[in-house]
Image: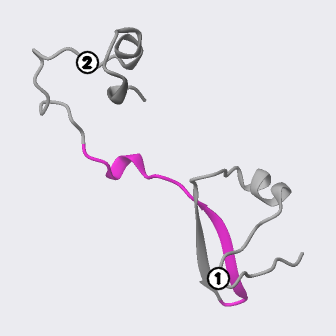
């Protein structure tokens, strides 16, 4: 399979390749150099390395409900 590099050094992968990797728009790919060339694989988030918000949020404040916010009348400039 051959892909073309643009003048901005961008590459477009065929849809079948991205589907087989299980990636889509906004996902990241990791390129790993090995003894026989390069390997491309999806870069997954390691959730164990993320911090927790437990104990850091004020329990007196109710969670924000985006659907409730959208249903309320607001000034047009505040709408999404």
User: Left or right: 48 with respect to 7?
Assistant: left
* Residue at (68, 76) in percent of width and height: 39
* Residue at (43, 30) in percent of width and height: 80
Q: Is residue 35 above or below residue 39?
A: below
Mark 2 packing: few (<14 Cα in 10 Å), some, or many (20+)?
Answer: few
Disc number for residue 78:
none
Q: Position of residue 52 (x, y in %)?
A: 24, 39
Quick one: label 2 or label 1, which is nearer the N terminus?
A: 1
Q: Could you say which quadrant of the image residue 75 lies in? A: top left
Query: Which residue is label 1 attached to?
Result: 9
* Residue at (71, 74) in percent of width and height: 11
Q: The magenta stretch spans which residues?
A: 35-51
User: Left or right: 54 with respect to 69?
Assistant: left
Query: Which residue is label 2 attached to?
Result: 63
Residue reaching furthest bottom? 35
Q: Position of residue 26 (x, y in %)?
A: 57, 53
Q: Nearer the viewer, residue 11 or 49?
A: 11
């Amino acid at each position: 399979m051959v892909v073309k590099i643009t003048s901005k050094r961008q590459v477009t992968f065929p849809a079948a390749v991205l589907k087989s990797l299980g990636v889509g728009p906004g996902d990241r790919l990791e390129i790993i150099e090995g003894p026989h060339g390069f390997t491309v694989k999806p870069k997954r988030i390691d959730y164990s390395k993320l911090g927790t918000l437990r104990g850091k949020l004020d329990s007196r404040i109710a969670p924000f409900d985006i659907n409730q916010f959208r249903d309320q009348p607001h000034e047009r400039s505040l709408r999404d």
